[in-house]
Amino acid sequence: MIVYDRWGEFGRPVLLLHDDPHDRTVWWTLAADLIAVASCTVVAPDLPGHGLSPARADCPPERLARDLDRLVTGLGLLRAPIVVGHGASAALAMAFADAYATRCVLTFDEDQQGIEDAVLRSVGRSGSMLHLTDPQGFAAEIRTLL
């Protein structure tokens, strides 16, 4: 069982994957900002062992990617999602993109040296991957992909 929050009903799905030790609530402000300015559906799940989702003994990224795909399709979201991986969940975002149709993968972490960085390259079945270290440009970058 994966507990999640959903904002919006229409538009491209945005799947927000939190870092350890956070849960889905870390995305609430960004989700509210996105649906206020763009037509999209935002889904923020609690990954296993975080928030209200129970822990699992065996949870490789490929299995969890399948579970997230079932969540997205079960919600009736038919368009390829933008998948956002924060910190360690970047590997999960990549596993999702390798197995399922994905508009784009965005990974985000804070650069320890404070240098802004953005790298664009092809990845899996997704259209592209963008890695950001500038927190102020993160929401704006998602909006440009919707």
Image: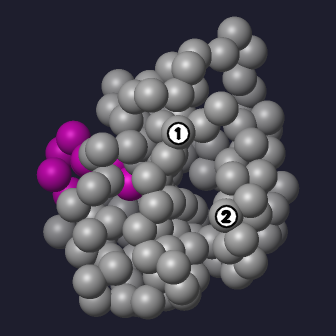
Q: Is residue 114 magenta?
A: yes
User: In the figure, residue 72 lies in which quadrant?
Assistant: bottom right
Dot 2, crowdedness within 10 Å: few (<14), some or many (≥20)? few
Give the percent coordinates (x, y) of residue 21.
Answer: 35, 25
For the record, the magenta segment spans 108-117
The front one of 144 and 29 is 29
Give the percent coordinates (x, y) of residue 139.
Answer: 29, 73
User: In the figure, residue 2 lies in which quadrant?
Assistant: top right
- Under circle 1, the secondary element is loop
User: In the figure, residue 20 lies in which quadrant?
Assistant: top left
Does residue 71 appear left or right of residue 29 in this picture? right
Residue at position x 30%, y 44% in the image: 25
Does residue 95 appear left or right of residue 121 in this picture? right
Q: Quadrant of the N terminus?
A: top right
- Under circle 2, the secondary element is loop
Query: Disc 2 to disc 1, how far (Cα)?
Result: 13 Å
Does 43 appear above or below 10? above
Residue 58 marker? none
Residue at position x 37%, y 89% in the image: 38
Question: Which residue does the numbered mark 2 point to in the structure image?
Answer: 75
Residue at position x 21%, y 61% in the image: 29
Question: Which residue does the numbered mark 1 point to in the structure image?
Answer: 3
The front one of 103 and 9 is 9
Give the percent coordinates (x, y) of residue 111.
Answer: 26, 47
Q: Amino acid at mark 1?
A: Val
